[in-house]
Image (spheres, rainbow, N blue to C red):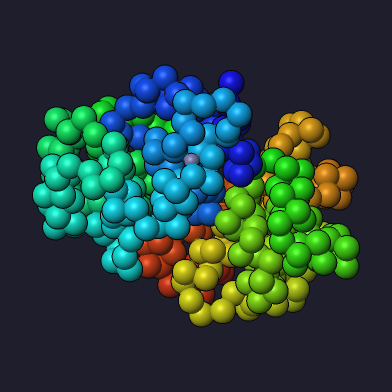
Amino acid sequence: MKPAFTDLIGNARLRDRLRDDICADRLGHAYILEGAAGSGKHSFALRIAAALACEHLSEDGYPLPCLECPACRKIMSGNSPDVITVGRSDKATMGVDVIREMHADVFVAPNELENKVYIIEDAQTMTVQAQNAFLLILEEPPAYVRFLLLSDGSAPLLETVRSRAQTFRLEPVPQDVLADRLTCTEPAARILRNANPSEFDELLMASGGSVGQAKALLDPKQRRAVLDEREAALTFAMLAASHRGSSPVLAFLGGFGQKREEAIARFSVMLSCVRDLVLLKQDENAPLCFFHDREDACALAYRFTSPELLRLTAGISEAMESLRRNANLRLTLTHFALRTGLLS
Ligand SMILES: [Zn+2]
């Protein structure tokens, strides 16, 4: 079997599956690649397009795609007229106009390659009208066309679209694999791991197993912002565990700033912290998504009862929901502190 998508990491089953389908010439017309921002959707999509066009596709001794032949190079550099990226814009939604424009192009035969690949970015932002227009193309696409819809999964696509496409979910890359890759390819990662191993571990945890996110966090400014939020979440958990009276709690609440979106983001990190503690209460070996030091986390979880942790989880979720419904920030924070027993 050809080694497949060798420059990507993680998602081994997906890579094998795509290799088998491409080599057997049974790739479907439409795929939905679902995964968080930075999880590698675009990298996968480009490589699928390259694999379809690779001049060494049927030769042993080359990985798929080879990334060296002229076809692969042209696609990977974004210069192939037959690999078309659709929908990359600053707009919050993708309207029917974008799909109509694509519709006209779909029926023009490929320029150079046997296939024409459309990579639809942020497919979750397609309006219902746009999805219905897309459905018209999906019902009877020309044989040479492949659609790769990239979605972060935040809004589900219409069932009618999903039923005509295969969905592949990109899994987070395991931390050790991610650490190896980063230190191999990024000098900044090597420096950080040597100078501050604990901060490097924090970065891996904060990346959520996303290569793109991990690379972004190598930038000290971005990393600082994320680490500050993680620290705030940990402060909150310590406060809740220690029942230390009102003034540290008020100081913590005062640190929330004025913006609702930022408060929601802070609550969401707090939620992932508390969720880890809930899981650890059930099973000390549970997979964690916030704590990088399991021993520390277990010690902290031990200081709570399960009902206390569930009350915190419910309080955070409720506060986030209220803020999303435009509730007053200060009132929400006060209610949150009373509801969770931080303030009595
Ligand atoms: Zn090639």
Query: In x, y percent, where is residue 32?
Result: 37, 38
Question: Quick check: 148 above or below 160?
Answer: below
* Image quadrant in which the N terminus is located: top right
Query: In x, y percent, where is residue 87?
Result: 29, 57
Picture quadrant where residue 335 is located: bottom right
- Is 270 situated left or right of 117 in this image? right
Residue plotted at (49% across, 49% down)? 43
Residue plotted at (58% across, 56% down)? 212
Foreground residue among 167 and 16: 16
Query: In x, y percent, where is residue 182?
Result: 72, 55
Picture quadrant where residue 213 is located: bottom right
- Is 316 situated left or right of 127 in this image? right
Question: Quick check: 26 above or below 319?
Answer: above
Foreground residue among 260 and 181: 181
- Is 139 situated left or right of 338 in this image? left
Question: Quick check: 195 above or below 202?
Answer: below
* Image quadrant in which the C terminus is located: bottom right
Residue plotted at (61% across, 52% down)? 211
Residue plotted at (40% across, 57% down)? 78
Foreground residue among 15 and 216: 15
Foreground residue among 119 and 157: 119
Is residue 88 visible from the viewing direction of this image?
A: yes
- Is 254 situated left or right of 83 in this image? right
Is residue 338 visible from the viewing direction of this image?
A: no
Query: In x, y percent, where is residue 203?
Result: 72, 59
Badge count: 0
